[in-house]
């Protein structure tokens, strides 16, 4: 037979290329008709957009006029021009003086002069403080440093710079004037100030200022009771020399502060030294439970002692002891004082045995030792320097705390306890941290307690200046005072240790 025909060849791995035939051209697009969603003159259906109104630009507004301060009625005394450039209190006086009552006019003008005075003391140009030399038409300082400096550069320019206080009003360091470095310049308050009533000038008053000073005002007495000045009594007021000032003048740093006073309205000013109070009436013989030397409604004892005396019967045991410790501490510290006759120390006691804390009572008793209310602790308790006793200059006197103190349960004495004090010392008692209990004394460990010597003190003793301080302890209640190991009681003996258990003998099997 004939051989089979050969198999057909395999197809190629690629498709045969087909020539590109461009698509036939499309018909031109037809314009869509305009869509109308509402009837002519009717409202559009819900959700359909309405026609947009044509854009109409907003017409421009009228041009802005520059701000002008309303003119104030000018008086023949002070034409009110340039008031926006002055200190706040001066602006208040300028704008409202005719509507204020006389007292408020004077009060506001005093505050105005104080602000101008303080500004005249400032000379820190890098902080915008160049002092005060040039004034407005009213005579008040321009508050802006740049305006002061600009006027100082050309003092004859006129305009805002026409009112010149003088070259010595400005500081040389700020290029505003010629005043050298020192406490103040030649600035002075206004020499005459008008007083207004019903819009008309009714009187003229004057003012004065203390520079680098501050005075305390007593509202109840309407008076300056005392002043504190950097130069003390050497600081002299500027302005009207007839205005009185407080006779109390203390030396304290008040640089850059001012206080001003005007005589427009009368008041007590504390300038005259008050008359000394009348001597206390002769004391009466009072029993121990009554108050002694009750002067002006104030008890003559230290506060904690008066509290213990009056309230001890209603307190618990621990509170009685706590307040009596504080009482002895106050009496101890008072005994160490010997600065002047007002604080001469403690020598004379009341009927309970507490110090009279008023110096006048101590002096009275020193002159009347036989008075039944004056109980003498001894000449060694008083300092010779104050005329109260014979104790020479030194760290302490012979004062000592009570030897026996009653402990009360209501009105009944149930027991007694004793106390001791460390003078020129301070002790910290931290019951929670016994390791922090420490005493700091002027003489360190050389300071010995006075009173009951059996009372234990902290074992830590530091040396540091503590003159005039006291720390007192009483053994009426127990507490951990740091003199024994932690959790040991200084006033209760530890219980005896239990005997050791007998040895256990195991018999041989």
Image (spheres, rainbow, N blue to C red):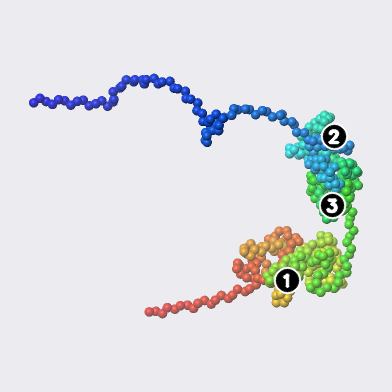
Q: CA distance from mark 2 to mark 1?
A: 73 Å
Where is the C terminus found, in terms of image quarters?
bottom left
- For the point 79% across and 48% down, which residue is it? 253
Q: Nearer the viewer, residue 7 or 248?
A: 7
Q: Which residue is mark 3?
A: 224
- For the point 55% across and 29% down, which residue is it? 40
The 10 Å Cα crowd at callout 2, few under 14, some 14 to 19, many 20 or more, is many
Q: Secondary structure at mark 2?
A: strand
Q: Secondary structure at mark 3?
A: strand
Where is the N terminus found, in terms of image quarters?
top left
In the image, residue 298 lies at what x, y percent? 81, 64
Residue furthest to the left: 1
Can you say whether 347 is above or below 7 in the image? below
Q: Are marks 2 and 3 in contact (CB under 8 Å)?
A: no
- For the point 11% across and 25% down, which residue is it? 3
Q: Which residue is mark 2?
A: 163
In the image, residue 275 lies at what x, y percent? 90, 58
Q: Is residue 134 visible?
A: no
Q: CA distance from mark 1 to mark 3?
A: 42 Å
Q: Nearer the viewer, residue 61 or 208?
A: 61
In the image, residue 414 lies at what x, y percent? 70, 77
Q: Upstream in the sequence, badge 2 or badge 1?
A: 2
In the image, residue 88 lies at what x, y percent? 78, 41
Q: Upstream in the sequence, badge 2 or badge 3?
A: 2
- For the point 66% across and 28% down, which residue is it? 59
Q: Are marks 2 and 1 in contact (CB under 8 Å)?
A: no
Q: Upstream in the sequence, badge 1 or badge 3?
A: 3
Q: Which residue is mark 1?
A: 312
Q: Is residue 141 visible?
A: yes
Can you say whether 177 is above or below 12 in the image? below
On the image, which quarter does residue 484 sit in?
Answer: bottom right
Residue 294 is left or right of residue 426, and the answer is right
């Amino acid at each position: 037979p004939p051989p089979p025909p050969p198999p057909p060849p395999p197809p190629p791995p690629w498709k045969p290329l087909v020539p590109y035939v461009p698509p036939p051209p499309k018909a031109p697009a037809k314009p869509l008709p305009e869509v109308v969603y509402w009837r002519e003159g009717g409202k559009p259906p819900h959700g359909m957009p309405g026609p947009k109104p044509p854009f109409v630009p907003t017409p421009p507004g009228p041009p802005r006029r520059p701000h002008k301060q309303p003119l104030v009625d000018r008086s023949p005394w002070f034409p009110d021009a340039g008031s926006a450039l002055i200190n706040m209190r001066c602006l208040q006086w300028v704008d409202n003086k005719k509507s204020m009552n006389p007292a408020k006019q004077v009060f506001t003008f005093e505050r105005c002069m104080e602000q101008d005075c303080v500004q005249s003391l400032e000379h820190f140009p890098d902080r915008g403080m160049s002092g005060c030399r040039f004034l407005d038409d009213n005579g008040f300082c321009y508050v802006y440093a740049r305006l002061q400096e600009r006027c100082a550069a050309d003092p004859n320019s006129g305009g805002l710079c026409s009112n010149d206080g003088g070259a010595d009003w400005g500081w040389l360091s700020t290029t505003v004037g010629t005043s050298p470095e020192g406490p103040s310049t030649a600035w002075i308050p206004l020499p005459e100030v008008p007083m207004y009533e019903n819009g008309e000038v009714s009187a003229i008053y004057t003012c004065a200022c203390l520079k680098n000073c501050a005075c305390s005002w007593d509202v109840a007495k309407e008076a300056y009771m005392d002043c504190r000045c950097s130069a003390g009594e050497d600081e002299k007021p500027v302005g009207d020399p007839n205005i009185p000032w407080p006779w109390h003048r203390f030396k304290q740093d008040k640089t850059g502060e001012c206080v001003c006073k005007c005589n427009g309205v009368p008041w007590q000013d504390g300038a005259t030294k008050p008359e000394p109070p009348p001597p206390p009436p002769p004391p009466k013989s009072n029993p121990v439970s009554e108050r002694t030397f009750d002067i002006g409604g104030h008890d003559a004892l230290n506060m904690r002692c008066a509290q213990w005396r009056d309230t001890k019967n209603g307190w618990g045991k621990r509170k009685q002891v706590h307040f009596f410790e504080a009482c002895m501490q106050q009496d101890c510290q008072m005994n160490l004082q010997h600065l002047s006759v007002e604080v001469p120390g403690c020598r004379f006691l009341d009927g309970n045995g507490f110090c009279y804390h008023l110096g006048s009572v101590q002096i009275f008793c020193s002159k009347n030792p036989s008075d039944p209310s004056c109980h003498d602790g001894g000449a060694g308790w008083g300092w010779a320097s104050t005329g109260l006793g014979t104790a020479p200059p030194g760290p302490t006197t012979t004062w000592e705390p009570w030897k026996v103190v009653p402990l009360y349960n209501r009105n009944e004495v149930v027991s007694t306890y004793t106390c001791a004090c460390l003078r020129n010392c301070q002790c910290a008692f931290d019951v929670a941290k016994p390791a922090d209990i420490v005493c700091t004394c002027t003489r360190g460990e050389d300071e010995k307690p006075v009173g009951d010597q059996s009372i234990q003190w902290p074992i830590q003793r530091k040396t540091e200046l503590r003159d005039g301080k006291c720390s007192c302890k009483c053994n009426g209640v127990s507490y951990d005072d740091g003199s024994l190991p932690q959790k040991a009681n200084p006033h209760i003996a530890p219980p005896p240790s239990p005997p050791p258990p007998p040895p256990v003998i195991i018999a041989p099997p």
